[in-house]
Every structure is written in structure tokens, then in C-alpha cells.
Image (cartoon, rainbow, N blue to C red):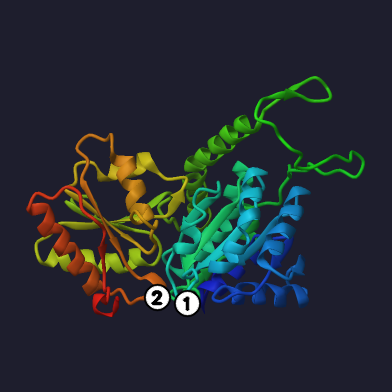
Amino acid sequence: MTVKVMTGNDAAATAVKLARAQVIAAYPITPQSPVVEQLSKWVEEGELPAEFVAVESEHSALTVCIGASTVGARAFTATSANGLAYMTEQIWWAAGARLPIVMCVANRAMAAPWNVLNDQQDSMSVRDAGWVQLYCRTNQEILDTTAQAFKIAERSNVPVMVCYDGFLLSHTMMPVDVPSAEVVDGFLPPRTQPLQIVDVNDPRNVGPVTLADPRKDADGVLQPGYMELRAMHNAALLEALEAVPDTDAEWEAALGRSWGGLTSEYLLDDAEVVLVAAGSLVTQLTLVAETLRAEGVRAGVLGIRCYRPFPVDALRERLTGRSLALVFDKALSYGFQGPIAEDLKAALYAAEDAPAVFGAICGLGGRDVSPDHLAAATRDALADLEAGVRDREPQWINLAEGSMR
């Protein structure tokens, strides 16, 4: 293992190289472009024996990956923000076709108005498309999670999205332990049973119209209808609740590092107040928990590493018996609240001794959010809780209300 100082984008590219991706297709967009630029360089120089396909749009990038994955190749792409939005049709196709594609998303704000800085609106907006979504806190976690993503995808035959905060991680330099190719080969061998549904000796139509009800095929075998296929897809995604922690445990056995599986935690054992988030914000919250503990508040942190499938049982286990869960979302489901807060309330609805769940919106479009902001928001939430409030509107952090007209 070699320690190198690298950006989050370089960590992602390194993982894709170690995973021996066979087809890479991409269209550049800030802040993910350095991922595929580095991979393109390695392919050009012969360091990575893969096909690199430069395309004219993000929609085409994912289309190339769909074709490659359909014939059994290990396929990868990366994007951000409006590039992800441009892929939307194929995001659903890749998931519905059960193709084990891996995609990195360097999270960036959605336009309009144009903004290239970080929040998580882009990936959160496709949370219901049927991909596994994993969120990273550090550049080391980006490398490890991207490598793990190929194994998770190929075990469950579902695509995996590895999300990390644009610029905050994508362009920030950190020390990263880079495992040897031999170790990663042992963890992630080539696929022995690829999803070979295209055979030149057995030509067939891929993706025909599927009606609502089950029908017999040409051989007289009853095949699922559209609804059954959706139920099977959902079951496969739920199986990732086992595949994600299992794969993290295998990675730990091979390399000595674990990222918590479905969730991460810090100072949680005796915490009455739990601060919840996904991505690099989780790292900031560890400082907030320490500050609040110095003030006599038993605070802890629960990070959402696996957002889809949503780890309901794990969250119930870690949150029941607490007084308050305060969720910091870097995204908004317009007309309602932050997506993680919304999902957490639903997950805890029927749980006994569940905490109050308050939401907060922060960091949209790269708006500064400091540990001081987060600590102040926590103190406000505690004051509301002590006043008997059990539900409230999301609090907007560091919002310049004087500029709104």
C-alpha cells in the first residue's frame, strides 16, 4: 500500500483503474471532469487496458455504458449536476435493465441559475430511480467506496452511484492509502458470470415493450409483467442492505479499513442529540458534537453512507431512545423539506421511543456552512425541543433573508 496526496477526483479515478473497468464513457462537466481526464490519460498511455469512449453528451455517455454492461463489460462513467439531469432517461433504463454500472457523481448545485459549487440536489433528485446511492466523507472513502461499488453492483445486478461533494472533496488534496493492484484483484476478480444477454449466435430484441400482466414467451414459459419486474427490481435493491455492509467487511478483511457499512457514527453511544447528514458534512458535524459536549450536551453524529436503499432498520436501531435527531440536508424537496429528514421521519414513524426529528437546510449552491453555524442550529433545535415542540418547519442555515425580495 502506498500513501499519496490526491484529490477526491484522483481517488475515484484510481479506484476505477484498480477495478479494471473495461469501458469508460464520459462527457466533461465541472467538477467531475478530472476523473475521466485522468482515466483517458491512463488508457492513452496503455496503463489501463480499457475502451475510452468520448461522446457528445452525458445522455450518450450512460448509453455507451448501458450497451457495454449489457454484453458483460465492467462499465464506468462520471458526471455532475445538469449532466446527471441530462442522463435522466438512461438513469432509469440502466436501473430497470438491472445493469451493474458504476457512476461517480461529484455533487454540484442544479441550474437555473447556473452554479458550479456544491450541494446534493443533483443526486438526490434521482434517488427514486432504482440505483444504490453511497455518499463519501473523505478522499480515502471515495477510493474505497468506488472500488467496493463494482462488487456491490455485480453481486446485486443493480447500478451504483458513488456521490461526493464537489470541490469540497473533488478538488481538495488529502493523503490516501492506495492499495496494490494484487490486493484489489483478490477483492474484486473479473466477472465469471457476466450478464450476457447479447449473443451474436442468438440474436434477440433487447428491451421490448413489456405489458402490465405476465405473459408466456415463445417457449410457453410464463414471464413477469411490468409490475412483477418492478417488484423484483425493488427486492434486488433491498438486498443491497446486506451487500453494502458485506462488501465493506470484505474490504476491511483485505485492507484493514471499514467505513461503517450502511452508516457511520461518532460519539453516538450515550448521545441524546444525534446530528444526521450525508457526505463531507458528516466530518464537520464531528467537530460540532465535540463543541456541544464541552457545553454539557450529549451530542453524537450519525452519517448516512447508504442513502438508497434507505437503511431503515439500522437507523431505527441507532436512533430509538434518543431525544432529538437533527438532520442537515444539502438538498430540498421543493414544497416540502430536506429529503433525508423526510425519509428519516417516515422510517421512525412506527418506531417505539423514537426521537423528535427536526430538519435543517444548508449549503445550497456552495453557501458557507461552518461548524459554528451547525452548532448554533443545534442549540436552536434544543431550545425548541425543551419548549415542547415535536415538529417544525425546516430551519434554513446562513440564509440572507435581507436579500430576498
10 and 329: which is toward the camera: 329
Image coords of residue 363 (percent x, y): 35, 71
Q: Image height check: is 268 above or below 227?
A: below
Image coords of residue 66 (percent x, y): 71, 53
Q: Earlier in the sequence, mark 1 or mark 2?
A: 1
Q: Residues within 10 Å of mark 2 (few under 14, many from 20)?
A: some
Task: Kindly tell me whether residue 180 is visible in this rendering.
Answer: no
The residue positioned farthest toward the front in the image shown? 405
The residue shown at (36%, 47%) is: 343
Image coords of residue 67 (percent x, y): 76, 53
Give, as a three-letter code, the residue at label 1.
Asn
Disc 1 designates what residue?
115
Image coords of residue 235 (percent x, y): 54, 35
The residue positioned farthest toward the left in the image shown? 387
Disc 2 designates what residue?
366
The residue shown at (19%, 42%) is: 321
For the N terminus, give its image quadrant.
bottom right
Q: Is residue 206 left or right of residue 251?
A: right
Contact flag, marks 1 and 2 (Cβ < 8 Å): yes
The residue positioned farthest toward the top in the image shown? 220
Query: Dot 1: what SS?
Result: loop
Q: Residues within 10 Å of mark 1 (few under 14, many from 20)?
A: some
Give, as a three-letter code, the residue at label 2.
Gly
